[in-house]
Amino acid sequence: MKKSLQNLFIAIIYIILYAPLLVMVFFSFNEGRSTSVFSGFSLKWYQELFSSRDTMTALQNTLVLAITSAVIATVLGTAAAVYMYQVRNRAWKTTLKTVTNIPMMVPEIVTGVSMMLLFVFVGRLLGAANALSFWTLLIAHVTFNLPYVILNVLPKLNQTDPHLSEAAQDLGSTPFSAFFKVVLPAVLPGIISGFIMSFTMSLDDFVISYYTTGSDFQTLPLKIFAMTKKTVKPDMYALSSLIFLTVLVLLLVVNISQIKQDRKNSGK
């Protein structure tokens, strides 16, 4: 009885989480514009999606921003995690971890407004005609992605043998070569997880992007927000469904790869 109640509780949680997404995917194939009456199966909104130049431009901008910021954040975050792992002073390490967690606890609107003020201030000092642009947006996305990369890579470093690099150097490797050939492959699952999390966080960010982007660069969340002032067309359901399915496939691939790697390591 207890186990049945637990399963029922978990089922209710998953229904609450995924019901809106499933409804969105379902009505993206609706022939009509209604979100309550299914008038027939159709790929009409997917066709309109790919024929809309503005939407495709916003999607391209979003993907370029998400991939670029995720790559930069992954590189910087991995380097920061390695440094934090090698720090021996416990007080300094605790301080670094606390500072890393602060950006995740601060409300996004506070982060967005503060970064906008900083960019405008620096832009005026440099005499820039337009202080906000793609580059300020990229800096903002890298900034809020960094903690997620660090929190994914650092536990993997803590799980590795602390003498792994030393053993490789005893066998003739340089410290640089030992890191890339021995340590980096050991923490690669954490790096990949950090990259995917950074990519997805950047992909759907609205609040920080709203305050730090210029007028010449529009991401998909900003475009959808502009649509809500009038009417959100069903082709946005189609686009959101494609993004959801893409992220879902990425997460499944990463998790399956991680499970296979763990089984392989346990077998050894």
Image (spheres, rainbow, N blue to C red):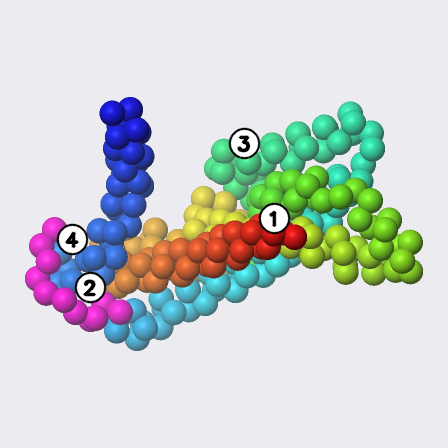
The vertical placement of 44 against 156, above or below, is: below
Marks 4 and 2 sit apart, C-alpha to C-alpha, by 11 Å
Separation of residues labelled 4 and 1 (CA atoms): 49 Å
Give the class, few, some or many, for how many residues have Cα within 10 Å of label 4's Cα (few <14, many ≥20).
some
The mark nearer the N terminus, 2 or 3, is 2
Q: CA distance from mark 3 to mark 4?
A: 35 Å
- Residue displayed at 48% across by 37% down: 109
Residue sitting nearer the eye, 200 or 124: 200
Residue 105, which numbered label? 3
Q: 136 left or right of 159?
A: left
Marks 3 and 4, the one that precedes in the sequence: 4
Decide whether the magenta segment is chiefly helix, strand or loop.
loop
Relative placement, left or right, of 104 versus 54 is right
Q: Residue at x 49, y 38 (%)?
A: 108
Residue 135 appearing in the image: no
Which x, y percent locates residue 17? 31, 41
Amino acid carrying label 1: it is Ser
Q: Which is closer to the viewer, label 4 or label 2?
A: 2
Tell me how far mark 3 sits from mark 1, CA to CA: 36 Å
**Residue that label 4 marks:** 35
Which numbered disc, 4 or 1, marks the residue closer to the eye?
1
Residue 266 - label: 1
Asked if the stretch drawn in magenta spans residue 37, the answer is yes
Which secondary structure lies at badge 2?
A: loop
Task: Please identify the quarter of the rendering in which residue 86 is found.
Answer: top right
Q: Are there few (<14), some (14-19), or many (20+) residues within 10 Å of tag 3?
A: few
Q: Are marks 3 and 4 in contact (CB under 8 Å)?
A: no
Mark 1, secondary structure of its residue: helix
User: Residue 29, labelled with which disc?
Assistant: 2
Q: Is residue 42 above or below residue 204?
A: below
Residue at position x 12%, y 51% in the image = 36
- State the separation of the CA atoms marked 2 and 3: 38 Å
